[in-house]
Every structure is written in structure tokens, then in C-alpha cells.
Amino acid sequence: MRLLVDVMCGGIVSSLRMCNHDTAYAGDRGLEADDSVLAVARDENRTVVTRDKRLAARADEAVLLESRDTEAQLEELAAAGVDLSLADEPAFCGRCNGPLESVDSTASTPEYAPDAADVEVWICRDCGQHFWRGSHWDRVGKTLSRVSDSDEE
């Protein structure tokens, strides 16, 4: 799914990217005015995710969220039919939404990342950030599990 998340909902961006949704964030692009958000959404064929009723009403496609709480926003997205399953093979950078590629097991990694010989590691082709399934991945997975459990009730 191609999404454009407005600045009111920034807490859900990395989770959506971890679920392999191509997720642009208005804050990363300096999009503040509704007309700018709508133009990008239209030009890039993105669904707007917002808490702003007027913005949602003007968008070609939108998911209107009510909650300010990140987990509750994820629950609302799940209820709206957005798949919130962690990706087996992540495709989008959690930081910038750039494309990820696997790091060869013989390649060196930065000090903050594990050795690629021990753990599967990906690198963003745009910003150079390294990613792996570590404690953050586990925390997001637990949150998404709670969200999907509450969605089934």
C-alpha cells in the first residue's frame, strides 16, 4: 500500500514501513499545507493517513484516524483493512522510506549493527542506515500482535 502520513500521525510511520507499506511522511518532506499534502498524494497515488477531518474529506483516498495514541492509531488502520503484518523481507527503510537491500554475509557493518555473518542485515540504498531483526523489531511485532488481537474482537 502507498501511504502519505501527515504530521499528526508520525508515530506510526516506521511500523507501516516495517509492514512493507511504501510510507511517505509529510514531516520528512516539509509538507504542512493541506494543498501540498493533497498534491503529493495525488501525484504519487498515495492514500492520506490523517487525523484532520477536512484534509481527509478533500483527499481522493484517505484513512481518517481519531486517536492521538500510536497503538490506537494502528488499531484504527487495521480496522480500516490495512495489513499490519511484519514483512518477512523488509523493503523500506524505517528512517527515510528508501529501498532496502540485503547486506552480503561477508560484508562489514557499522559498529551499531550486528555482524552480517551472524544475523540477516539490510542497508538502505538512499540513506545508508542498516537494519536487522533485533529488539526494536520484536517490540513492534508485539505491538502489532496486540493490535491484530484487538481487531479480531
Image (tube, grey):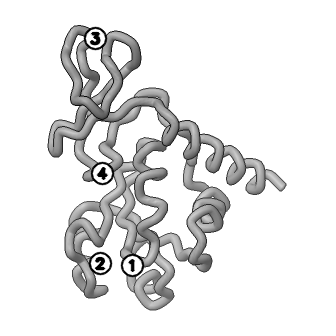
Residue at the extreme bottom: 54
**Amino acid at the residue labelled 1:** Ala
Q: Which residue is mark 4?
A: 95
Nearer to us in this view, 29 or 62: 29
Q: Residue at x 19, y 15 (%)?
A: 107
Q: Residues within 10 Å of mark 4 (few under 14, many from 20)?
A: some
Is disc 4 in contact with disc 1, using a CB cutoff of under 8 Å? no
Q: Residue at x 45, y 90 (%)?
A: 54
Q: Residues within 10 Å of mark 2 (few under 14, many from 20)?
A: many
The quarter of the displayed image where residue 93 is located: top left
Q: Position of residue 149 (x, y in %)?
A: 76, 49
Q: Nearer the viewer, mark 4 or mark 1?
A: 4
* In-image side of 111 versus 120 (left or right): left
Is disc 1 in contact with disc 2, using a CB cutoff of under 8 Å? yes
- Pointer 2 or 4: first along the chain: 2
Nearer to us in this view, 22 or 44: 22
Q: Residue at x 79, y 51 (%)?
A: 152
Q: Nearer the viewer, mark 2 or mark 3?
A: 3
* CA gap, disc 1 and disc 2: 6 Å
The quarter of the displayed image where residue 33 is located: bottom left
* CA gap, disc 2 and disc 4: 22 Å
Mark carried by residue 38 = 2
Q: Which residue is mark 1?
A: 59
The answer to whether 102 is drawn above or below residue 152 in the figure is above
* CA gap, disc 3 and disc 1: 44 Å
**Amino acid at the residue labelled 4:** Arg
Q: Position of residue 49 (x, y in %)?
A: 45, 70
The answer to whether 110 is drawn above or below residue 57 in the figure is above
* CA gap, disc 3 and disc 4: 23 Å
- Pointer 3 or 1: first along the chain: 1
Mark carried by residue 105 = 3
